[in-house]
């Protein structure tokens, strides 16, 4: 009998509490919906303000930052864009660490910098060799200091149909054009993270934005560079520690006259000119000093690509066929 009374009392208690529980549930749902609406409104404000600010910066670019005293390591500094970029940063007061696998070209770059009263150090390194890159890092820290700007510029570009590209060439493309970036990042990024100060520059290409014939493996590596940098940006941005002082810049040049492009094909030379190393270096340095995340060279290709990407995939192919530019096989 006592057990039955106890059960009845418990049941009555649940019945008594039921209306209050329902009211609580309704109140909770209203609170959740209100919170969600508020969060969506804040999201809308943030996106709108950022959109407006981005357009403002389009017409009023940020002031270029100083690079005086920055220790700037450039791979592939022995010729072309690497050399021209090194010269420009040295003229702005940067301390250049010139890295190349070619000692003659690399020494020429260092000599040119020193002739202009700049500071430069020469190091030879096979950037595809992780142990060699780690050893390079130790030497540079000991002899120059912690690298604060890393410019991954070294690259190769065999130009031929995929069926004619050897296994060795494909492996070399990936080793130099993308895998080497990881060894250099793992070597030099930690010191930047410790100080929350630094700048990473990665050389992609317009071939990392759109696919081109005779460049299938090359395009794959340059698309990979952009993906790597985007993921790295998010890894640093979403970390609970503050890494806002580390900036990233992706460079996507059109055909640059560095000797890598043996047989360029351009239907309208006045519209799509081959970029000179001087012009490319000017744009690279400007992008770094203004902390731009990504640029194309020339800049007009950035907006043309955005416009074309908004179309159905088959539509911009007509424009591509009309322009009829690219690279013939070697």
Image: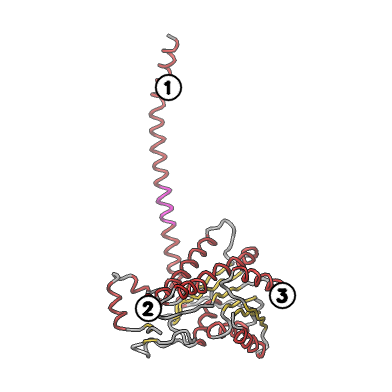
Q: Quadrant of the N terminus?
A: top left
Q: Which residue is mark 3?
A: 143
- Return the disc, 2 or 1, that comes first in the chain's sequence: 1
Query: Position of 39 compared to 127: left or right?
Result: left
Identity of the residue drawn at 60% across and 70% down: 198
**Image quadrant in which you'd find residue 139:** bottom right
> Is residue 10 within the magenta segment?
no
Horizontal arrangement in the rendering, residue 120 relative to residue 1 (left or right) = right
Q: Where is residue 3 shown, x and y percent of the image?
A: 44, 12
Observer able to see residue 208: no
Label 3 residue SS = helix
Q: Which residue is mark 1?
A: 13
What is the chief secondary structure element of the magenta stretch? helix
For the residues carrying marks 3 and 2, which lies nearer the camera in this image? Answer: 2
In the structure shown, which secondary structural element does the residue marked by tag 2 occupy? Answer: loop
Local secondary structure at mark 1: helix
Viewer-proximal residue among 219 and 7: 219
Q: Quick one: 100 or 95, which is closer to the camera?
A: 100
Whole-angstrom CA distance, mark 2 to mark 1, is 80 Å
Q: Is residue 249 visible?
A: yes
Marks 3,2: beta carbons within 8 A: no
Residue at numbered disc 2: 161
Q: Is residue 165 left or right of residue 147?
A: left
Q: CA distance from mark 3 to mark 1?
A: 79 Å
Region rendered in magenta: 34-42
* Towards the viewer: 69 or 321: 321
- For marks 3 and 2 on the same chain, the one whose residue lies earlier in the sequence: 3
| Camera-side mark, 3 or 1 | 3
Q: Is residue 37 magenta?
A: yes
């Amino acid at each position: 009998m006592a057990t039955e009374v106890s059960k009845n009392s418990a049941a009555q208690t649940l019945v008594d509490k039921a209306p209050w529980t329902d009211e609580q549930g309704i109140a909770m749902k209203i609170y959740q919906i209100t919170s969600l609406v508020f969060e969506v409104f804040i999201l809308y404000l943030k996106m709108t303000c950022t959109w407006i600010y981005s357009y403002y910066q389009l017409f009023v670019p940020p002031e270029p930052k100083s690079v005086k005293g920055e220790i700037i390591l450039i791979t592939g500094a022995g010729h072309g864009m690497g050399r021209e970029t090194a010269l420009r940063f040295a003229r702005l007061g940067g301390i250049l660490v010139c890295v190349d696998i070619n000692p003659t070209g690399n020494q020429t770059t260092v000599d040119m910098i020193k002739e202009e009263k700049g500071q430069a150090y020469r190091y030879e390194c096979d950037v595809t060799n992780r142990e060699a890159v780690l050893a390079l890092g130790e030497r540079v820290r000991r002899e120059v200091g912690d690298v604060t700007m890393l410019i991954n510029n070294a690259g190769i570009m065999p130009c031929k149909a995929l069926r004619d590209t050897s296994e060795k060439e494909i492996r070399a493309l990936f080793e130099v054009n993308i895998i080497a970036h990881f060894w250099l990042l793992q070597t030099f990024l930690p010191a930047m993270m410790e100080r929350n100060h630094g700048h990473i520059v990665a050389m992609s290409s317009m071939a990392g934005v759109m696919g081109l014939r005779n460049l299938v493996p090359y395009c794959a590596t340059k698309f990979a560079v952009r993906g790597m940098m985007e993921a790295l940006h998010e890894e640093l941005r979403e970390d609970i520690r503050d890494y806002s002082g580390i900036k990233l810049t992706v460079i996507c040049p059109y055909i640059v006259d560095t000797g890598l492009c043996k047989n360029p094909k351009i239907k309208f030379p006045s519209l799509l000119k081959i970029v000179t190393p001087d012009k490319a270096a000017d744009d690279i340095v400007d992008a770094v000093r203004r902390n731009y995340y990504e640029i194309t060279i020339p800049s007009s290709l950035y907006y043309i690509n955005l416009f074309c990407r908004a179309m159905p995939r088959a539509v911009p192919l007509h424009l591509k066929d009309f322009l009829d530019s690219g690279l013939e096989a070697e």
